[in-house]
Image (cartoon, helix red, strand yellow):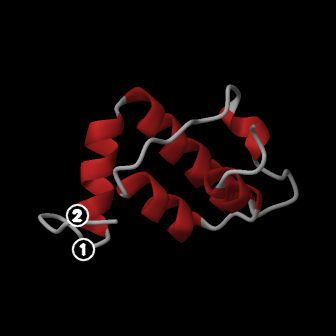
Amino acid sequence: MYGKTPLLISCRNANIEIIKLLLASGREINLPPKIDHCLISNKNEEIRIEIIELLESFENNPNETRTKLRIELGFAGNYFF
């Protein structure tokens, strides 16, 4: 059910680093039907936009986004999770 996954909890708390780790992990990610509605509106607008763009990128091309995040986080070529 939406609202209780680690991804959505991280979105609500605007924890971009955890979101990146979750997306880079290679595990199945179920994005909410309306990405922008998973975020609390009173968070920093720049972070909110960054999270939305990251989730939209993952939704459009999960493999490319996951690869970019793994490189950014220093996990490229390593087994992760």
Q: Is residue 28 above or below residue 4?
A: above
Q: Which residue is mark 2?
A: 71
- Name the amino acid type tagged 2: Ile
Q: Is residue 29 toward the left or the right of residue 11 in the image?
A: left
Mark 2: give few (<14), some (14-19) or many (20+) Cα within 10 Å. Answer: few
Q: Which mark is residue 61?
A: none
Which quadrant of the figure has residue 35? top right
Q: Which mark is residue 74?
A: 1
The quadrant of the image that shows the C terminus is bottom left
* Residues tagged 1 and 2 counted as in contact (Cβ below 8 A): yes
Q: Is residue 43 above or below residue 38?
A: below
Q: Is residue 6 above or below residue 80?
A: above
Mark 1: give few (<14), some (14-19) or many (20+) Cα within 10 Å. Answer: few
Name the residue rendered at 75%, 43% in the picture: 38
Picture coordinates of residue 21 (x, y %)? 44, 64
Task: Give the number of marks.
Answer: 2
